Image (tube, rainbow, N blue to C red):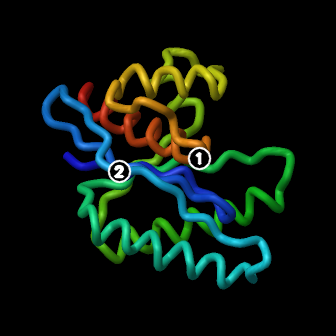
Amino acid sequence: MRILGVDPGIAILGWAIIDKEKTNLSLLACDAIITPSRDTEPTRLLTIYEKFSKVIQTYSPDILSIEQLYFAKNTKTALTVAQARGIVLLASAQHNLPIASYTPLEVKKIITGEGKADKQQIQWMVKTILPMITSLPKLDDITDAIAIALTHAYIKSFL
């Protein structure tokens, strides 16, 4: 099974491709789609759509594993993240890609065993689960996307 994990965002959208063969997990690719803040919102969303569609076409995942939105204090940020998430869902639907959605709490609990885990705990566990990662990606968004993909791999193992 090939899992495409996504940490949605309009400025930075992290993505990762995890291959799961029985109990073996491997990281095939990971990166971020970065949109310049000087671009208009519609242009940024179009960039996400085009680049994300290319990721789907390049890696042919079996499923999308994406983080559910949670509303923080900044409603404006939450709305733009929701728009980017919608673009990802649209592109996935156009490619007939099934979708699994997980809350940040579920990701933390599955990856670390603790729902209140911090970024460092997530990063440490990602490196522990995938020892082929010699150094973590520079952007937390990419590491989060890896964790989201791993969450689906683990949940699928228990079903």
Give the residue at x 51% y 31%. 106
Q: Which of 46 and 93 is in front in this view?
A: 46
Please identify, in this view, whether the residue under mark 1 or under mark 2 is nearer the observer. Answer: 2
Mark 2 surroundings: few (<14), some (14-19) or many (≥20) residues within 10 A: some
Mark 1 surroundings: few (<14), some (14-19) or many (≥20) residues within 10 A: many
Give the residue at x 39% y 42%. 149
Q: How many marks?
A: 2
Check the image and report above or below for 97 versus 71: below
Image quadrant where residue 44 sits: bottom right
Give the residue at x 56% y 16%. 114
The first of marks 1 and 2 along the sequence is 2
Query: Looking at the image, which residue sits at the far top?
Result: 113
Answer left or right for 83 relative to 62: right
Report the disc number at residue 141.
1
Query: Looking at the image, which residue sits at the far right?
Result: 73
Check the image and report above or below for 4 versus 138: below
Q: Position of residue 110 (x, y in %)?
A: 45, 24
Give the residue at x 31% y 59%. 98
Answer left or right for 144 relative to 9: left
Q: Which of 118 and 124 is in front in this view?
A: 124
Answer left or right for 136 relative to 155: right
Give amino acid for label 2. Ala
Report the disc number at residue 64.
none
Q: Where is residue 113 in the image (x, y as percent from the top left)?
A: 49, 15
Check the image and report above or below for 62 versus 127: below
Give amino acid for label 1. Asp
Q: Distance between the residues labelled 1 and 2?
A: 14 Å
- Quarter of the picture containing the C terminus is top left
- Quick one: SS at disc 1? helix
Report the disc number at residue 29.
2
Image quadrant where residue 158 sits: top left
